[in-house]
């Protein structure tokens, strides 16, 4: 921990960042993000297995961008998110200082996204077996059963948009659900509006989701939202060999085609 | 408040026979915002158009829905009519009651109901239409012609003679293409080279034509009127400005055994070579793949020693040049299947089973036998020759289901040429059907059969094999009650299928034009736009579109040239403004586009670029997508992809499409969800 504190301190002192985003642990044991601007505050930072939040979500915030150069402590999912949003042109290499702790407990500071790409590919997180099992189970249901399952799950949605707020890939200034000229997605939390919203959210994350599972974790109604995107990611990988968050350059199945695609209709 | 006029056309019986047009007009009059509604027998006729014009003035209409045929037919007609009455043409839309309704349904109340709904949808759309102005883009009045065969030559000359600059590129060392390889041409039996070479010389001498031989297109960017072509000029290893074409280098070149492409592999050539005596330009190039100097590290160098001008330059490098052009004519020609394609005809193992193109070279005075018909294996004059038409063509089992079109005619010609040269010889032709549609074509085939005594056998050949120095051709005569026929031939000529060039798929992709399942380039419309491609500004000429004979290729080339000349007749192009755009809004957002640029790769026309929004001090505020109005074809793919709905499309906006869809919903259908 001391090493991490020293690292943050030195980053803030030598001016490679004027804000450092990290985790902190309260006396009650609650993990929250912390925004460190002064070197002497760096001992606030904490890291442990319980640090689940995806801190990459803060990178897009105007309040954070106003600091100019920003440092961030990233777990593996945050790293994947950063890589994906870098590929999507949302952050610049020279404005970000990224620090992580590798599986051996050593501090790693990345010079650029190339290094992040290499690190992420060497330390790819294994899919969550529990989630995979649930996806598998759902896939084995009939189409009607699956539809009923989701109708039931999504009926409890209260449209608080916590899933959107927690997702680093949901960085649009104006979300489709906020478009009211015309109002494509109805906003009240009745079943039509809920289904429209969640189908849209899942489709917008298809092949872009890094599977940090923040959406499910933050859902106050405990809807297993991540299963939708996990399944879509799986499909993008099987059908098009595309995985999100592993490359610093854009590789998006829904906007590209390959000349050697196995399907003939593309030719 | 909208004041929409609805005009229902009967199209004679076409719509009126199935749809109760009067009732549709009555119903439409009750839709909110409709100020006037009427039906008429032929809306596109002069009186019909005048009805629209008068109604616009009389009822002060703000928009017009013409419910008639497909907008592909008469949209320009009606848009012009409304603009003559003083309202913006883009405030007029068509509901397709013919192709989308009356032609595909039976006469029934529900058919009329559907017609009413189609009108309702368009009324809701037109209420939200905005007046639009056509887009103007400048034109670079230079044409790029790809390929120097007869089609390319004709197109280049026609464009050049109409006063515009032409860049012609040809991948081989000389222009002339397949036509220069032919002996004589049907149906007149005039010498191919005699009629072609004057055109080749004209290309070389024309002040408006710049010719690049030994060159290939590597990329094409831009859009109609404003293309940028990247052209690779392959190193010729000889400075053509110095070379006088004396041929000393060719005489001295020690590498003499290279199969000669010009002679379809029947002869040989040297590593430094001119493809044929009348080549344009008539100066040699060094084939680096076969030249010892290049394959064995600077050994040899004989040509440089004998060249009195010092023109040989081994150090030349491939060069890539970029040229601005306004239009492209693709005339890259075709290829033929080789004899190795046919297992039943010996997989190309028998030397005396040759292709039609090889026969052309045997019959040609400039060929390897100086025009004498001698068989490749031992040089003997064949006394019994068999021609097999439809070798591969019209054979779905072989994957070539189309007719190669030229084979019937050239096979008749081959048989005739053979009979003219070997009087006592026997010529037989196996055919499926004789397709001799063309001026003087049928007469030509009759002449072969009747005057030159060519034995035409209707039937296919199942097998060819060698026995005692003869080729045994086993076939069937289907006109003689499927009687088996066996001929002991000295030589067999296969009229192999005409196919797309190797690499044509890649070329189509770099040109962004479409192609069919056989990799022939696709025209924009099979009947009404046979020389245009789906990409504006790119035309097709000749056999790169489908197998064609010389007159067809030349006609199409002239057609393509006129399209180019018409394009170049104006300084600016106008086009429909139905294109996509990225929205803009006030600060601090400036645009809801977040600049993820996922849309860049989705655009099939490469029309999306990055734009920087800067404050007045030049500081970057944000990067957003920008759509090039010249390139955008309004396909809407980016609109569908954009997560934040930041891209919209003029004429098909989100609010218009949404209103159209909602117009079709009624309370009942919403209850089910």
Image (tube, coloured by chain):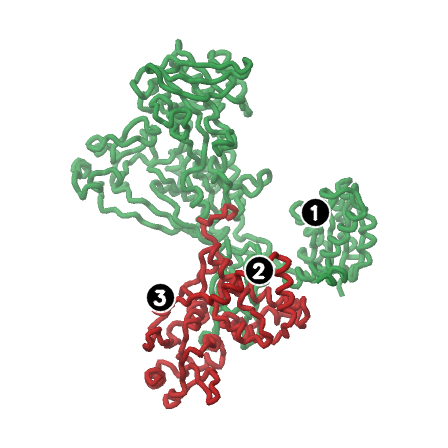
Report, in whole angstroms, how far the alpha carbon at label 2 lies from the one at label 1: 24 Å
Q: Which mark is residue B100?
A: 1
Q: Chain of mark 3?
A: A
| Residue A70, visible in the rendered structure | no
Name which residue lies at 76% across and 43% down: B15
For marks 2 and 1, the one nearer the N-term is 1
Q: For label 2, count other residues whose C-alpha is less than 10 Å away and answer few (under 14), some (14-19) or many (20+).
A: few
Q: Which hue is chain B drawn in?
A: green
User: Which corner quadrant holds the N terminus of chain B?
Assistant: bottom right
| Secondary structure of the residue carrying numbered label 3 | helix
Quarter occupied by residue B524:
top right
Q: Which hue is chain A drawn in?
A: red
Q: What is the x, y in percent for residue B355?
A: 40, 26
Q: Confirm or deny contact between disc 1 and disc 3 (CB under 8 A).
A: no
Q: Which mark is residue A122?
A: 3
Q: For label 3, count other residues whose C-alpha is less than 10 Å away and answer few (under 14), some (14-19) or many (20+).
A: few
| Secondary structure of the residue carrying numbered label 1 | helix
Mark whose residue sits in front, 1 or 3: 3
Report, in whole angstroms, how far the alpha carbon at label 3 lies from the one at label 2: 36 Å
Report, in whole angstroms, how far the alpha carbon at label 1 lies from the one at label 3: 56 Å
Q: Please determine whether, in this image, residue B472 is positioned above or below residue A74.
A: above
Q: Which residue is mark 2?
A: B640
């Amino acid at each position: 921990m001391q090493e991490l504190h020293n690292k943050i301190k030195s980053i803030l002192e030598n001016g490679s960042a004027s804000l450092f985003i990290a985790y902190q642990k309260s006396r009650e044991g609650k993990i929250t993000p912390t925004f460190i601007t002064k070197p002497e505050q760096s001992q606030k930072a904490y890291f442990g297995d319980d640090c689940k939040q995806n801190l990459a979500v803060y990178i897009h915030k105007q309040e954070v961008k106003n600091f100019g150069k920003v440092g961030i402590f990233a777990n593996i999912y945050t790293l994947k998110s950063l890589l994906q949003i870098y590929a999507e042109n949302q952050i610049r290499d020279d404005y970000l200082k990224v620090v992580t702790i590798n599986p051996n407990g050593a501090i790693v500071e990345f010079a650029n996204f190339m290094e992040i790409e290499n690190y992420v590919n060497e330390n790819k997180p294994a899919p969550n077996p529990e989630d995979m099992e649930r996806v598998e189970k759902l896939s084995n249901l009939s189409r009607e059963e699956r539809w009923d399952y989701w109708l039931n799950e999504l009926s409890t949605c209260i449209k608080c948009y916590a899933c959107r707020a927690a997702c680093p890939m949901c960085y649009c200034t104006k979300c489709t659900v906020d478009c009211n000229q015309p109002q494509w997605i109805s906003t009240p939390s009745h079943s039509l509006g809920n289904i429209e919203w969640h189908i849209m959210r899942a489709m917008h994350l298809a092949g872009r989701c890094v599977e940090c599972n923040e959406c499910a974790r933050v859902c106050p109604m405990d809807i297993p939202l991540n299963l939708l995107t996990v399944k879509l990611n799986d499909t993008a990988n099987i059908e098009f060999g595309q995985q999100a968050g592993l490359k610093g350059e854009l590789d998006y199945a829904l906007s590209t085609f390959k000349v050697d695609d196995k399907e003939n209709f593309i030719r | 408040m909208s004041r929409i006029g609805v005009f229902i056309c009967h199209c004679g019986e076409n719509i009126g026979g199935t749809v109760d047009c009067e009732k549709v007009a009555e119903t439409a009059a009750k839709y909110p915002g409709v100020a006037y509604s009427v039906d008429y027998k032929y809306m596109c006729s002069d009186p019909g158009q005048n009805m629209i014009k008068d109604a616009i003035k009389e009822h002060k209409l703000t928009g017009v829905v013409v419910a008639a045929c497909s907008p592909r037919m008469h949209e320009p007609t009606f848009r012009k009519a409304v603009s003559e009455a003083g309202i913006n043409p883009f405030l007029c839309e068509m509901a397709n009651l013919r192709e989308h309704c009356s032609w595909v349904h039976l006469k029934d109340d529900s058919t009329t109901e559907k017609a009413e709904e189609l009108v309702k949808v368009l009324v809701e759309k037109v209420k939200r239409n905005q007046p639009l102005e056509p887009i103007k883009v400048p034109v670079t009045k230079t044409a790029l012609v790809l390929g120097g065969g007869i089609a390319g030559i004709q197109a280049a000359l026609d464009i050049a003679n109409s006063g515009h600059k032409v860049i012609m590129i040809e991948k081989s060392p000389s222009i002339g293409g397949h036509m220069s390889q032919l002996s004589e041409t049907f149906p007149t039996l005039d010498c191919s080279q005699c009629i072609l070479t004057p055109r080749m010389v004209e290309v070389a001498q024309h002040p408006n034509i710049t010719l690049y031989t030994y060159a290939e297109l590597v990329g094409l960017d831009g859009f109609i009127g404003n293309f940028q072509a990247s052209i690779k000029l392959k190193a010729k290893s000889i400075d053509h400005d110095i070379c006088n074409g004396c041929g000393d280098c060719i005489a001295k070149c020690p590498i003499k055994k290279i199969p000669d492409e010009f002679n379809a592999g029947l002869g040989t050539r040297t590593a430094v070579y001119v493809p044929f005596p009348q080549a344009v330009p008539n100066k040699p190039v060094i084939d680096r793949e076969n030249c010892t100097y290049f394959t064995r590290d600077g050994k040899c160098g004989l040509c440089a020693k004998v060249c009195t001008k010092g023109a040989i330059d081994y150090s030349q490098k491939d060069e890539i040049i970029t040229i601005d052009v306004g239009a492209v004519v693709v005339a890259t020609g075709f290829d033929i299947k080789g004899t190795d394609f046919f297992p039943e005809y010996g997989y190309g193992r028998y030397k005396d089973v040759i292709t039609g193109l090889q026969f052309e070279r045997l019959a040609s005075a400039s060929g390897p036998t100086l025009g004498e018909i001698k068989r490749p294996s031992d040089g003997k004059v064949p006394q019994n020759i068999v021609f097999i038409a439809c070798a591969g063509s019209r054979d779905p089992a072989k994957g070539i289901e189309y007719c190669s079109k030229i084979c019937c005619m050239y096979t008749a010609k081959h048989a005739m040429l053979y009979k003219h040269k070997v009087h006592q010889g026997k010529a037989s032709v196996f055919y499926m059907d004789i397709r001799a549609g063309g001026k003087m074509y049928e007469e030509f085939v009759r002449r072969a059969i009747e005057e030159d005594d060519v034995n035409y056998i209707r039937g296919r050949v199942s097998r060819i094999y060698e026995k005692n120095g003869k080729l045994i051709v086993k076939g069937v005569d289907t006109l003689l009650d499927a009687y088996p026929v066996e001929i002991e031939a000295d030589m067999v000529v296969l009229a192999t299928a005409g196919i797309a060039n190797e690499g044509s798929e890649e070329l189509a992709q770099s040109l962004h034009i479409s192609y069919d399942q056989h990799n022939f380039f696709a025209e924009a419309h099979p009947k009404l736009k046979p020389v245009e491609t789906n990409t504006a500004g790119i035309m097709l000429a000749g056999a790169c579109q489908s197998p064609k004979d010389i007159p067809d290729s030349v006609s199409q080339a002239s057609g393509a040239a006129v399209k180019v000349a018409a394009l170049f007749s104006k300084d600016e192009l106008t086009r429909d403004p139905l294109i996509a755009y990225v929205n803009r809004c006030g600060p601090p957002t400036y645009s809801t586009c977040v600049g993820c640029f996922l849309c860049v790769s989705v655009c099939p026309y490469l029309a999306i670029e990055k734009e920087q929004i800067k404050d007045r001090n030049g500081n970057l505020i944000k990067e957003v997508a920008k759509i090039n109005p010249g390139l955008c074809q309004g396909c809407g793919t980016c609109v569908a992809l954009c997560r934040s709905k930041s891209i919209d499309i003029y004429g098909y906006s989100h609010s218009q499409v949404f209103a159209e869809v909602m117009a079709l919903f009624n309370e009942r259908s919403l209850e089910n969800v």
